[in-house]
Image (cartoon, rainbow, N blue to C red):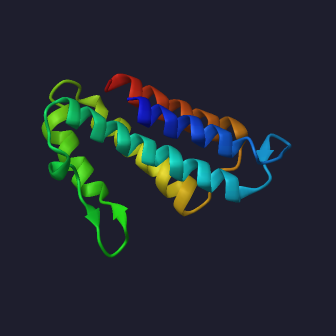
Amino acid sequence: MKEAIRYLDNAKDILSKSKIEDNKYVDLKYVKSACGVAYLGILKAVDEYLLKKGFMEKNLPKLVVSKANPSVDAYREMLKKHLTVHNGKLLREFEDIYAELHIAGYYRGLLRHTDTVKAVLNAAKKFVEKIK
């Protein structure tokens, strides 16, 4: 999971570039970038888990050609088949992280409060730790 942790660490570094005023990040560009990188770290963690379990790289979730983004549906299916057998809460946690990091944080840029962003990044790190 070194690569996934590296992504999460990079997200924190990106986030540190934004000024903070009144417990809010001033420059949302850095918040959005950090959330995007952290979300990619989550996908990387799932990939690493699957590779460790014997999957070949060609069988990992595919990129959606039109968006050049990993398909969340493909990751959901992999989680259902191979991870939730061990822990049924993982899929719900993945869904929360997807909604918070990718949709609210990266895609829509809705996260501003420092406590909220830090909580979401901590949830991402805990998810990675659970699937080590």
Q: Residue furthest bottom?
A: 66
Q: For residue 64, what is the image quadrant?
A: bottom left
Q: Residue at x 70, y 49 (%)?
A: 112
Q: For residue 86, what is the image quadrant?
A: top left
In depth, the one of 83 and 43 nearer the eye is 43
The percent position of residue 48, horizontal first and vertical second, equals 29, 36
Q: Residue at x 16, y 30 (%)?
A: 53
Q: Is residue 29 above or below residue 8?
A: below
* 127 to the left or right of 109: left
The percent position of residue 97, horizontal first and vertical second, equals 44, 43
* 5 to the left or right of 61: right
Q: Is residue 40 above or below residue 130?
A: below
Q: Residue at x 21, y 49 (%)?
A: 60
Q: Residue at x 22, y 54 (%)?
A: 74
Q: For residue 91, what is the image quadrant?
A: top left
What is the number of callouts on the image?
0
The percent position of residue 88, horizontal first and vertical second, equals 23, 29
For the N terminus, give its image quadrant: top left
